[in-house]
Image (tube, helix red, strand yellow):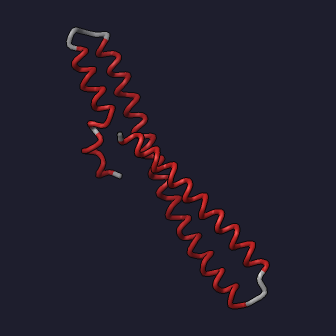
Amino acid sequence: NELDDTELVVRQLKQKLSGIQDDIVTLTARFQSTLRYMEKIEIEESLAELNARKEVVAGYVKKAQKRLLSLQTRYKELLTRGDSYSSGSSTGSSSWQDIRSEAKGGYGASSSSNS
């Protein structure tokens, strides 16, 4: 469902960000140890590219985490609302089924354009 997909995206983006940070550390160490001027220029260019990528990926991580929090909150609200319906009346079970199917991803199709 959409909640699981978003959790996966957050995890993958964090791994990508970690890899970029590791590359920055490696190149920075290489930059400090090299003596050749041309190699330093190439490393500076690579570092600038990596820092730009880091900023972009960090932005995506922030957006994905915000979306995940929104989905988790909505899911929790649906479950809470479902509990109050099921204990209320005889029509509660059909409402609970509607809420449960919505919580499992039924509502995600219309809100996916926001991401």
Q: Viewed as shown, does residue 110 lie left or right of 77?
A: left
Give the residue displayed 73% in from the left and 76% down from the top: 30
Count of marks, rendered view? 0
Q: Position of residue 82 (x, y in %)?
A: 32, 20
Vertical order, 95 against 65 (above or below): above
Question: Quarter of the image holding residue 37?
Answer: bottom right
Q: Nearer the viewer, residue 91 or 8?
A: 8
Vertical order, 61 against 24 (above or below): above
Vertical order, 111 against 95 (above or below): below
Give the residue displayed 63% in from the left and 84% down from the top: 42
Question: Quarter of the image holding residue 40?
Answer: bottom right
Give the residue displayed 37% in from the left and 34% down from the top: 74
Q: Position of residue 105 (x, y in %)?
A: 31, 37
Q: Viewed as shown, does residue 42 lie left or right of 103?
A: right
Give the residue displayed 30% in from the left and 26% down from the top: 100
Rendered-image quadrant of the N terminus: top left
Q: Nearer the viewer, residue 6 or 70?
A: 6
Q: Position of residue 85 (x, y in %)?
A: 29, 16
